[in-house]
Image (cartoon, rainbow, N blue to C red):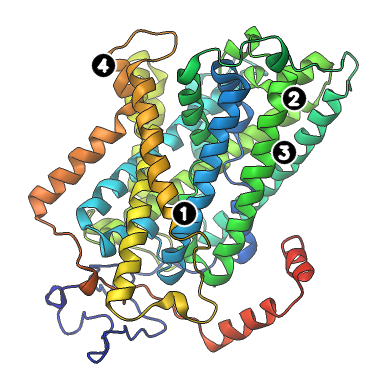
Amino acid sequence: MDENMFSEKEKPVTTSAANSIPEVEEGQMLEYAGERQSGNAGQLKRTFKARHIQMIGLGGSIGSGIFIGTGKALRYGSYPGMFLGWGLICTQAWINMQVMSEACIIFPTSGAFVDHAARFVDPSLAFALGACEWFAWHTTLAAEGSVFRLILTYWTTELPVAACMTIYLFVVFSIHFLPNRWFAEFEYITASVKVIMMIIVIFTCIAMLAGAGPTGTTHHAENYTSLPAFPNGFKGIAQCFLLASFSCGGQELLGITNGEAKLPRWNLPRAINSLAVRLFLFFGSAVIFIPLLVPYTDSRLLGPSNLAASPFVIAMENAGIKGLPDFLNVVVLIGLCALGAESLYITSRLGTAMARMQLFPRFMGVVDSKGRPYMALISSSLLAIILTYINCSNTGGIIFTWFSSVGSTVYFIAYLVIAVTNWRMRKAFQVQNGNPLKLKHAYENKVYPLGSIFLFVSGVFVIGSTFYISLFPIDASSSASGFFQTFLCVPLFIVLYVGHKLIYKTKIVDPATADLQSGRRPLSDEDIAFLDNYYSKPMYKRFLSYVTL
């Protein structure tokens, strides 16, 4: 970091001239690369406990993507598309957390991967990615409001669209008016409900395969035995990549919440293990059971995007199972509110972090005494209201479709940046002769360097697949409008990066001068004693600690 950026009072932490190893003190106030100290900015509160982040890892993102989006995936890609789509995307999500967590544990800031890209690669790259992520999560928040109304149409179509959206926004905003711990508890409770529902669905699928239900029959897997395996060729598989990313994406939340965790070294690795259960057990089971229960030719899969088009509900209706679809609908509604709250949380924390990093307007970095970034929350809420209500009109709906396409590929761009950041961070540790990954109880990526290589290569592959399906969509002709409705994020990212670099003339960060100081949270003696005690226990006791929180 260029020390000329700070006055004498603003310099955060010194560096030993003898060996360039950062001298980091506990309780430091500056967290982000390039941050300037401000007496009235306030600080986020580290109130997230292990059970909060662990349950978010286990139950986060379980919602309309897996319950409804899988129906479209089955229709377009059949079982090969679903296996390849969810198999690759789930693996990407898990590897991404392995790679990203190295930096998130050493530098646990709410800017997470955006902050790390700025300090190790290029501030312009951090701006482009952060701005795309920030806007994409606003569109996610608004899109869930539209789905909220569609889910309610399973019971009634009498409710006005605007009224449904207002109810949804009221719930989401109310959660963030309260202190941060209430958001953590809300996420914990809703994630628990979703996990219970997912377990019920899995056992119900097993029972239906065996012929359970008043009108149930033994299933003979028509998708495997009598229907073509690839109904839409590679297009169907490419479409499944996108649909899988909607249900599996958003693992950035774990890195961002880790910035408000009491003990990041303890919390985040456990959340990664919980994430593996969600990705490979819950989502993997769904991908296995759905093609066995419902043929991709079922016309109900092409219905409106509400629960009636869910392959789970179609299978339950075929088996004559009553009541459970209604319960599933309630859980999906809860999940939509939870995802909306998560989206507002991410946008407010990213906005605050980027303001502190001098990438967004400075006023967005203000935090009140209860640890709420209220200026970023107000800004995000206003934008979310606009994006949500424009869906009430036909013209607005077309505009929103374009905006929401930013979220289609932003996950894959983030994977590329996170992989590059990991390589540059490791290089900085090597050049500056101070590798915190070798300290006691440090978290080190178990699959380095293969993990970051896989993340980068697979990210390029999926972006290329998305380009292909955007250019040549299924059951539609090629058009500029259709192309950008899916692929807008990539050119937007490039324009933001080039524009920021031309205006601010940023340079690629030299590993020898990369900031290894701000945001560091070394383990205290109490932390080390706690971890010593945990890792001294037998494996079965450590396993039981996941289910006894």
Q: CA distance from mark 2 to mark 3?
A: 13 Å
The answer to whether residue 64 is seen in the rendering is no
The residue identified by callout 1 is: 451
The residue identified by callout 2 is: 325
Vertical relation: 58 (above or below) 245: below
Q: Could you say where residue 542 lies in the image, as x and y percent from the top left?
A: 73, 69
Q: Nearer the viewer, residue 349 or 282?
A: 282
User: Of tags 1 and 3, which is closer to the observer?
Assistant: 1
Q: CA distance from mark 1 to mark 4?
A: 35 Å
Which circle marks residue 198 in the picture?
3
**Is label 3 in a helix, a strand or a loop?**
helix
Q: Dot 2 surroundings within 10 Å: few (below 14), some, or many (20 or more)?
A: many
User: Of tags 4 and 2, which is closer to the observer?
Assistant: 4
**Tag 3: residue type?**
Met
**Tag 1: residue type?**
Gly
**Is label 1 in a helix, a strand or a loop?**
helix
The answer to whether the residues at label 1 and label 4 have Cβ atoms under 8 Å apart is no
User: Of tags 2 and 3, which is closer to the observer?
Assistant: 3
**Sooner in the amino-acid sequence: mark 2 or mark 3:** 3
The answer to whether the residues at label 3 and label 4 have Cβ atoms under 8 Å apart is no
Q: Is residue 208 left or right of residue 68?
A: right
User: Of tags 1 and 4, which is closer to the observer?
Assistant: 1
The residue identified by callout 4 is: 480
User: Of tags 3 and 4, which is closer to the observer?
Assistant: 4
Which circle marks residue 296 in the picture?
none
